[in-house]
Amino acid sequence: MITIGAVGDVHLDKDAAGTLRPALGRIADKADVLLLAGDLTRHGTVAEARVVADEFGGLDVPVIAVLGNHDYDRDAVPEVTEVLADADIHVLEGDGVVLSLPGGTLGVAGVKGFGGGFEGKCGSAFGEPEMKAFISHTVAAADRLRTTLNSLDCDVKVALTHYAPIPETVHGEPPEIYPFLGAYQLGNAIDCCDTALALHGHAHFGSERGVTPGGVPVRNVAQPVINAAYASYRLPASVQEPMTEVYQPT
């Protein structure tokens, strides 16, 4: 078995320094890897990234992350990524990583994703250039996720995004903002690649559990949803076997 710890939307700033570290000190006893589903900072500043690095850096397990919309706010993504990388936090954006863990090899494909909505109630690349650019950005992110998932040579594949790939895990949010919380194209990418689990954040008032149309378990790990320092998910080391323990509060 491979045990994955995951959390998103911690929104750290200087006032939150030290709040998560005590719960992460013995994470290796409960998880083989920690995945961070974006919105790690409040405003995407380098100073806030240093708080993230102090909280999540130097753990006894690998730490893999994607960024979220808050992390993009100050247009300092390269600098934020560098701070996290210096703390051995591997930031993904349209790429992936394969980890050799005690229970097998785990492949993680990561992309921030974007909005656009879900099938039947979604935007399309039609009309004004601004609308075309919006949806084209979403489609490009989904295409990168699909390509990366397909390229991973591992026992188990996990998709890590910030935006939601299905509507079920955003239930609880106002319906009017669903198009800004995720996009069905991400779910389509996840479904075509023998993915064992999809993790996302962003929907603070959403629901924890859902499933893609193709049957892939999806979990919203936004901290306000899981109400914990991280959640744990246990996966068998085979893409042919189902997840046998899907959620374990920490």
Image (cartoon, rainbow, N blue to C red):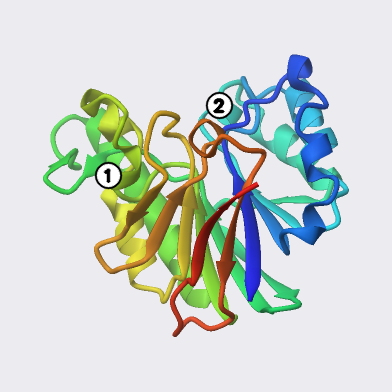
Q: Is residue 97 visible?
A: no
The part of the image, by quadrant, that contains residue 163 is top left
Q: Secondary structure at mark 1?
A: loop
- Residue 93, how many percent across, how many down? 57, 51
- Residue 245, how many percent across, how many down? 52, 66
> Which comes sooner in the sequence, label 1 or label 2?
2
**C-alpha separation, residue under disc 1 versus residue under disc 2:** 21 Å
Q: Tag on residue 70? A: 2
Q: Secondary structure at mark 2?
A: helix
Residue 249 higher or lower than 153, as above or below: above
Q: Residue at x 29, y 37 (%)?
A: 171
Q: Residue at x 60, y 25 (%)?
A: 75
- Residue 191, how many percent across, how many down? 33, 68
Q: Nearer the viewer, residue 67 or 58?
A: 58
Q: Tag on residue 167? A: 1
The part of the image, by quadrant, that contains residue 55 is top right
Residue 118 higher or lower than 216, as above or below: above
Residue type, label 1? Pro
Quarter of the picture containing the N terminus is bottom right
Residue type, label 2? His
Q: For the residues labelled 1 and 2, say whether their Cβ atoms are less than 8 Å apart.
A: no
Q: Tag on residue 24? A: none
Q: Residue at x 37, y 43 (%)?
A: 137
